Image (cartoon, coloured by chain):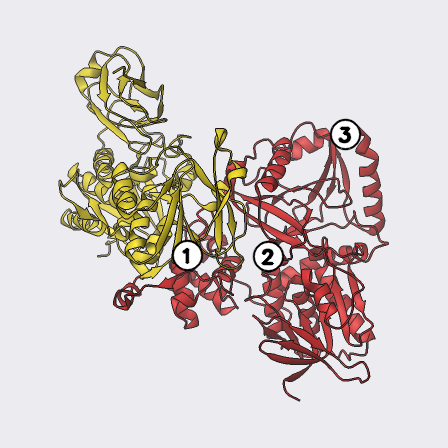
Chain colours: A yellow, B red
């Protein structure tokens, strides 16, 4: 399923995971004729291919699918949409022509180094996992300390276990999923240690992956030392006090040969930054308009490169929209500049997109800073929405209808989350 | 006599042992190097700060003071021959207090007298112009243009590769357990290893932090090695260019101080700490070490923040009880010490190689130059550093250059093949030869692919691939072998 690699394209999509595939489909739906998806791996589908557990598609397909099944549906749909997919290829740079065309430099095993032009680009590079270095766990540097995603690749793609007796630092969803996965493969999972006083994973994953398997989660606890010369021989953990400072008087040793890290995801925006695209310091993704266009005209972003999502279903929705706008851009259709800035207020860590435009419906994605229940989301003076609870691990989504914005006169719309009195 | 007879056995494959091996490989000799780790350069060398010192700060009354300037001058030619990462970016030695000016001037005088080239005193204005991101409360600096940065592990690998090309034998995973000798005859020393005995007329003890233990094996107890640990912190490439030169404080007696190091590969490294440790395997990093370094660095260069750390590591300096290098023959005939090689040991390494040859000659080892010594090696292909048109040619000649394995550092599969073909046997061996896994994701994406490539290229099962030899295994087989056969087709 190689692309024909004949330029110019209308839209080129960087990354063939769920975001990239949906963006390409969105672009075709909008009328773009020639769309190319460039993917690093031998097969499109992205990280979904190693997520062999089920639970994908409940929102989008109203059906419970595995990761590879979910990916397959979009690969098939992309083929039906006559989208070119170029696997085993790496985008090594993007240049801009004076007429607004984009030159995308691609390194590929089959085609060598090529530069292809297009009218618009969708960034869908996804994210990477935070590593040990990012949180500076003291101790030795043995083997057996790895990110949960790499352990998932060992287990699900290579058919090997990362170890036998496993501790997990961080309660991100991949870590929770891997706790269950490794127990099913005969490993002993001694516990999950989470720095925060609450889980960073979805509630359903805490219940289905830890509670159902009797795996303890230790909140407000962190790893204070890594031990072992060649291979991990154990870790030390301690509860944390104010300012997340470990209480070393209560430090204890946990016997294990493997430590999985599930301590957060970082959008992969090194290329975006190199292009001069403005990034949001909180999401670490591009600043985008209501059409998901970045600060660089004709370059759009979606999926985990824009902000880290909990559910692929929401990535798909976002990417279809980004792709549609990229397709329209390629055809010369331009929407008027956004006229309203959207800014985070009380207990809002971030909200997307960064600006809105009167006369259109908008899909808002946001996360809170702290858990709160029950509460109310207050969108300026145009809208209020009651929620039974909010937690940082679960993204909040809602729509703003065009008529709601019509009544708004200002240029800045602020979103707050405030507690509701029972 | 069981076992083979060599002219020289070198114990220890750090940068010093490797430099001696290469120097000896110029002569008609049978030489073996015994390394306890899975690959050379995996001890102190791998964790070295990677600095080529100008050499003005060590007095000529010491051995290190004499070897360092000579060593520094040898690096340009060595780089041409051995193609390791090295660049003379210059070094700055700053002061914050007016009363330190005389010390700075004294250092310059000492350096000028030693023949250190190009030393200049910079005032605050000049310093701010050249390094605007340094704190503006610095009042001046000594600038030494001959200071440089180097990838110390690449240097060790290249020295050893060249030595091997010229006939030196390398034995890895080969710890020395004892050495037998007979004072009454002129026969060889007998070096015992788990892999068998090695007989050698001369034994060069370049065992780093274990040098005193090796010396004790022949009954010598005239010095001890007291390891001094240094923790270093590698920062994200985002900070590339924040300083352009090596940034040193004025040296104290214990250490050259905490530095900001713009590494050869464009990352910024800060450190090291300097604390004595009784444990010769203590390469732990600590909360306290990080705090010490960042409290210091954030005052010196305010835009550096602890959140930019991508990895931390620690290494041990082999500090001798004499405070100086201990290089020379001993009471045991044929046994030569090359011990206590702490800073500026890396800079001195090539000069130490020459010096050890002189010592061995003085002890009766005949040094007959080989006619066919080849000084140069090919060096690794560095795809990311090539111009696009050259990259195009590389991919056309070998499609493995079109397969990016490490996306953070842009390392291709062909470069991983090359690393393995030049001695890499482990994940760390690949990483330190071609940078795969050294970037911001720290191997999160590429480790599995590198395991498969090592497995395929070395003809070993994936589970036999280790991080750095010994018990540093990475994966263990599942109980269901059917699944595994399917799984291996991946990647």
> Image check: A24 left or right of B171?
left
In this view, A159 is above or below B284:
below
Do callouts 2 and 1 point to residues on the same chain?
yes
Picture quadrant where residue A309 is located: top left
Which is more N-terminal, label 2 or label 3? 2
Where disc 3 sits, the SS reads loop
From the viewer's perspective, is B319 left or right of A147? right
User: Which quarter of the figure is the C terminus of chain A placed in?
Assistant: top left
Disc marking residue B97: 3
Residue situated in front as seen by the camera: A94 or B481: B481
Reading the chain from its start, which is encountered first: label 2 or label 1? 2
**Residue A7 spot, x, y in % from top left:** 27, 48
| Farthest bottom residue in view | B1
Chain of the residue on which disc 1 is drawn: B
What's the CA distance linking mark 3 and mark 2?
35 Å
Please provide percent x and percent y for residue B427. 47, 60
Q: Marks 1 and 2: in contact by CB < 8 Å?
A: no
Give the distance between the C-alpha atoms of the residues marked 3 and 1, in whole angstroms: 48 Å
Q: Nearer the viewer, residue A32 or A16?
A: A16
Residue B371 x %, y %: 69, 79
Q: Are marks 3 and 1 on the same chain?
A: yes
Which residue is located at x 16 percent, y 45 percent? A64
What residue is shown with label 1? B447
Q: Are marks 3 and 2 on the same chain?
A: yes
Query: Which quarter of the picture shows residue B16?
Result: bottom right
The residue at which mark 2 appears reads as: B46
State left or right for residue B383 relative to residue A48: right
Residue displayed at 65% across by 62% down:
B15
The quadrant in which residue A326 appears is: top left
> Alpha carbon of mark 2 to alpha carbon of mark 1: how far?
19 Å
């Amino acid at each position: 399923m190689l692309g024909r690699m004949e330029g110019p394209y209308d839209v080129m999509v960087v990354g063939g995971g769920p975001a990239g595939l949906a963006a390409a489909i969105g672009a075709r739906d909008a009328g773009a004729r020639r769309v190319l998806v460039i993917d690093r791996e031998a097969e499109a589908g992205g990280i979904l291919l190693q997520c062999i557990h089920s639970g994908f598609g409940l929102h989008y397909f109203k059906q419970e699918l595995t990761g590879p099944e979910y990916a397959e549906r979009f690969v098939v749909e992309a083929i039906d949409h006559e989208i070119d997919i170029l696997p085993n290829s790496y985008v090594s740079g993007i240049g801009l022509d004076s007429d607004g065309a984009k030159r995308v430099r691609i390194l590929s095993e089959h085609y060598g180094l090529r530069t292809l032009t297009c009218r618009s680009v969708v960034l869908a590079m996804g994210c990477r996992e935070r590593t040990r270095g990012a949180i500076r766990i003291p101790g030795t540097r043995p083997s057996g300390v790895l990110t949960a995603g790499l352990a998932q690749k060992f287990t699900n793609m290579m058919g090997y276990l990362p170890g036998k007796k496993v501790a997990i630092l961080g309660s991100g969803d991949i870590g929770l999923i891997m706790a269950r996965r490794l127990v099913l493969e005969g490993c002993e999972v001694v516990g999950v240690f989470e720095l925060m006083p609450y889980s960073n994973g979805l509630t359903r994953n805490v219940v289905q992956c830890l509670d159902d398997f009797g795996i303890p989660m230790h909140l407000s606890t962190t790893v204070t030392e890594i031990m072992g010369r060649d291979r991990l021989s154990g870790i030390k953990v301690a509860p944390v006090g104010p300012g997340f400072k470990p209480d070393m008087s209560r430090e204890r040793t946990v016997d294990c040969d493997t430590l999985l890290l599930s301590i957060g995801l970082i959008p992969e925006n090194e290329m975006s930054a190199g292009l001069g695209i403005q990034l949001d310091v909180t999401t670490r993704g591009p600043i985008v308009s209501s059409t998901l266009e970045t600060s660089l005209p004709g370059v759009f972003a979606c999926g985990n490169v824009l902000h880290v999502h909990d559910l692929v279903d929401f990535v798909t929705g976002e990417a279809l929209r980004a792709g549609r706008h990229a397709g329209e851009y390629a055809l010369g259709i331009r929407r008027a500049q956004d006229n309203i800035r959207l800014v985070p207020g009380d207990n809002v860590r971030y909200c997307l997109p960064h600006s809105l435009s009167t006369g259109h419906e908008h899909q808002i994605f946001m996360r809170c800073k702290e858990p709160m229940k029950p509460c109310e989301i207050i969108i300026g003076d145009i809208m209020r929405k009651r929620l039974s609870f909010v937690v940082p691990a679960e993204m909040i989504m809602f729509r703003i209808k065009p008529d709601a914005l019509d009544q708004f006169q200002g240029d800045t719309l602020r979103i707050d989350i405030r507690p509701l009195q029972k | 006599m069981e076992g083979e007879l060599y002219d020289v056995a070198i114990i220890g494959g750090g940068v010093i042992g490797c430099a001696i091996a290469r120097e000896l490989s110029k002569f008609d000799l049978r030489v073996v190097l015994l390394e306890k780790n899975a690959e050379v350069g995996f001890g102190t060398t791998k964790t070295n700060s990677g600095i080529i010192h100008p050499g003005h700060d060590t007095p000529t009354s010491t051995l290190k003071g004499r070897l360092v300037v000579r060593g520094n001058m040898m690096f340009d030619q060595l780089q041409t021959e051995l193609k390791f990462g090295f660049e003379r970016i210059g070094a700055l030695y700053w002061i914050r207090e007016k009363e330190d000016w005389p010390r700075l001037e004294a250092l310059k005088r000492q350096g000028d007298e030693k023949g250190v080239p190009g030393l200049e005193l910079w005032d605050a204005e000049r310093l701010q112009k050249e390094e605007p991101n340094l704190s503006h409360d610095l009042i001046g600096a000594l600038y030494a243009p001959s200071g440089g940065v180097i990838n110390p592990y690449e240097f060790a690998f290249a020295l050893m590769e060249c030595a091997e090309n010229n006939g030196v034998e390398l034995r890895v995973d080969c710890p020395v357990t004892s050495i037998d000798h007979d004072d009454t005859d002129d026969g060889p020393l007998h070096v015992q290893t788990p892999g068998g005995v090695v007989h050698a007329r001369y034994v060069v003890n370049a065992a780093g932090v274990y040098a005193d233990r090796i010396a004790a094996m022949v009954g010598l107890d005239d010095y001890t090695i007291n390891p001094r640990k240094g923790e270093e912190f590698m920062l994200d490439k985002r900070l590339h260019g924040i300083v352009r030169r090596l940034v040193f404080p004025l040296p104290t007696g214990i250490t050259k101080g905490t530095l900001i190091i713009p590494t050869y590969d464009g990352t910024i490294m800060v450190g090291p700490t300097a604390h004595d440790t009784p444990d010769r395997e203590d390469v732990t990093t600590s909360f306290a070490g990080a705090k010490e370094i960042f409290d210091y660095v954030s005052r010196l260069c305010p835009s550096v923040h602890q959140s930019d750390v991508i990895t931390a590591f620690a290494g041990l300096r082999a500090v001798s009880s004499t405070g100086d290098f201990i290089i020379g023959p001993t009471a045991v005939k044929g046994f030569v010490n090359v011990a206590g090689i702490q800073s500026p040991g890396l800079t001195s390494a090539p000069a130490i190689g020459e010096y050890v040859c002189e010592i061995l000659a003085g002890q009766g080892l005949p040094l007959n130059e080989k006619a066919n010594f080849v000084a140069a090696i090919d060096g690794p292909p560095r795809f990311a550093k090539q111009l696009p048109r050259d990259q195009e040619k590389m991919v056309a000649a070998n499609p493995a250059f079109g397969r990016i394995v490490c996306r953070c550092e842009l390392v291709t599969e062909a470069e991983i093949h090359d690393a393995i073909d030049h001695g890499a046997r482990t994940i760390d061996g690949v990483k330190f030869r071609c940078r795969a896994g050294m970037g911001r994701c720290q191997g999160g994406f590429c480790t599995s692919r590198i395991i498969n490539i090592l497995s395929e290229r070395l003809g070993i099962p994936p589970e036999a691939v280790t991080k750095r030899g010994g018990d540093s295994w990475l994966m263990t087989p599942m109980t269901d072998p059917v699944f595994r056969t399917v799984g291996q087709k991946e990647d």
